[in-house]
Image: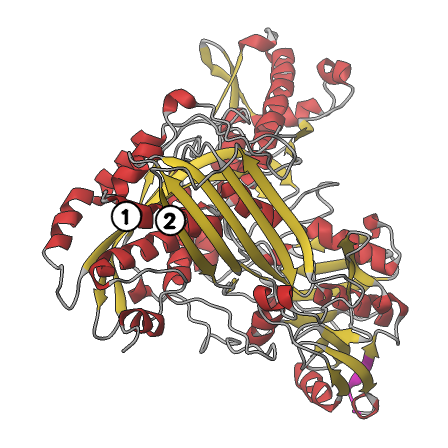
Amino acid sequence: MIGQSPKSKDAIRLLRGQGRYVDDLTRRDLVHLGVVRSAHAHARITRVEAKAARAMPGVLAVWTAADVPELGQPLTTGGSKERGFAVPILAGERARYVGEPVAVVIADTPALVADALAAVQVDYTPLPSLVGADVARAASARVHADWPDNVALEARGAVGEPDLAQPGLTVVRERFRHPRLAAMPIECRGVLADYDAEAGVLTVWASIQSPYSQRDVIARVLGLAAERVRVIVPDVGGAFGPKGQVYADEVLVAVAAFRLGRPVKWIETRREHAQCVGHDREQLHEAAVAFAPDGTIAALEDRFLADVGAYPVMGNGLTANTVNHLPGPYRVPHYRGHGESVVTTTMFNAAYRAAGRPEANFVMERLMDIGARRLGLDPADVRRRNLIRAAEMPYRPGLTYKDGIPVTYDPGDYPAAFERMLRAFGYDDWRKRQMATVGSPRPIGVGIACYAQGTGLGPFEGATVRVDPRGKVYVLIGVAAQGQAHSTTLAQIAAGELGAELDDVIVLGGDTSLMPYGMGTGGSRVMANAGPAVARTAAEVRQRAAVVASELFECAAADVRFEAGRAFVAGMPDRALPLGRLAQAAVRSKALAASGEPGLNACTWFYPDTVTWAFGGQVCAVEVDVETCRVRLLRHVALHDPGRAINPAIVEGQLQGGAAQAIGAGLMEEVVYDTQGQLLSGSLMDYAIPKADDLPSLDVVLDEHPSSINPLGVKGVGESGCIAGASAIANAVEDALADRGVIVRELPITATRLYALLHRGV
């Protein structure tokens, strides 16, 4: 089954409108919750007056942090001794970003909730707003009053001794800015919680990515055993990373349901989503690269500030991702990278799809193109001269990944893959077309960007596989899906190992009652972690089935074969039994007694040694209208090495979706705050995302080189499409306008920004 492309097992159900999302769920006696949020980016909270709201008919409760002991606890804590922090569930004395939860309202209907929220009065004493990492880095004011400064964490990486002052080198020094972005899934967050006092179990349904993290926080806050909290992830209308973070809102709903003994629901508005779900990507870079006369890289240096918002909840992982991914797929003999995570009075960050990698790619690929122009070389030739060669694999760039393991690139042939991508794009033909438009009102530009991506971070995932008496194969996993088609790809793995029919395999996940542990969905990790666990477990069940079949057939277990959901003796396909019959027999099978466990059932775990490394790139052609400053994409091709594509069609779809988000980052998306920390891009009227007519056909080329890190040979895919698209667009726009002196140093390339670049000094 691996390598085939059966259609998604969820497709028909979802197309028929049979999906079940959080807001589709209800319970008898359901009540609703709303959150009073800070109107200031930085302020002391001097008074919360809720008397009028509490007196309103139909309002069950209005709580502040002082009213309910559970809500005075921290949501999470972290940092060092000098720079410790605690994220509150409800802000008590100080608010640190617009939208931070201050109080909670529970009422009979959503309309009553809205009225009660409006009736709650909060008095503030404003404090200095610190918007932008450079502003906060230099400010005397502090986001956290007891810190010595606003630098939360640092990440470093070094190889060799960079010396950009050597004679004969061509040195490119530039300052780049990557904007802050927000994930904009179709479905905003939502939570429904219901406490069964008789059973002593709190059940929470939530549109999230990490049910086990959510379970553990809720259990801690309520003082319950984790086994008494069940978190279920129903259908999710997109997530892209930020839904993997634990926020106060889900905990508030759980506390309300537990204390009131009523089912409670909260559905996030789009404005709340824009304000209060983790942002990502905002970085300022001072970077330099030195090229030898032949165009090879001699040295690379980069210092950058990463804006992590009010609380550094992600640690230094995202900043370290940028440091480690900056050299990309190129031979860089001398490198020094240093990133500082700076807190500001804005929404804290989260691991948005490809976290830390697009920022690094933008810097490196811009340096490559600017260097190519300085050297008088084609941008493709500069990359050809620097790509790591197949004979150098497994390549060790000299850096250490955030898991503490030295980075080692998986086998691959980067130069050959690069040429495949250019041929699929028609690079030479587009260069000819471009020449015909030089100096015209609508010049064409071509842009290339390549990457090497660490994917599939552990530490583990597990799987249970069980065959029931009807012959159905249940695969239980600890990860949750948000549209990645786990129900199909993991079913393909199980069906292939068991010799079962794909339609008979049912994958269940996103429910903390199914597996004791799970590390969550994100980091392009499901196939690289859960995939091998499913394969290993299904193989063990197959061995057990062979033992049972050998008992019934009176043959050796080694002679049993499995195909199309049946077991038969080798060379005797007519002598067969269905898997369901073996499952029935396995419950009482004496042959399985030696294993110490009845039935066709097993649970195993897979621990990867480290991450897999995948190569990829994107190349595009754009047309720039120099009068209207509109950029139109004409062609876009993405190449990626998935290691081994379990379902090539699904892999291609993942890459196309990521590429669409990268195009948005390149041309239109940006979270914007004013100097007071007020969000100016709080709706889809102000935060632009790509529409269908903004996108060309997104062609995908798969270049498979199996990984050596896991037995399936898979490498991550889910985030890969996001990495290089914006960089390729930036390179293409500059390529189109190079004769006009344009250098692209900032994203997104909006018409306003492009006009300013074209009319400097006018």
Asked if 328 appears above or below 572 in the picture, the reply is below
Q: Residue furthest front?
A: 167
Residue 553 vs 449, above or below: the answer is above
Q: Could you tell me if the residues under marks 2 and 1 are in contact, i.e. CB atoms within 8 Å? A: yes
Of 739 and 248, nearer the camera is 739
Name the image quarter holding residue 149.
bottom right
Q: Quick check: is 57 in the magenta stretch? A: yes
Q: Which residues are magenta?
A: 56-62
Mark 2 burial class by Cα count in 10 Å: few <14, some 14-19, many 20+: some
Q: Is residue 600 left or right of residue 251?
A: left
Residue at x 17% of width, y 66% of height? 442
**Residue 692 picture quarter:** bottom left
User: Which numbered marker is on residue 172?
Assistant: 2
As rendered, which of 154 and 677 lies closer to the eye? 154
Q: Is residue 233 left or right of residue 223?
A: left
Taking the magenta stretch, the answer to whether it contains residue 81 is no
Helix, strand or loop at mark 2: strand
Please give the name of the residue rendered at 60% of the width and 16% of the height, measured from the top-left corner: 546
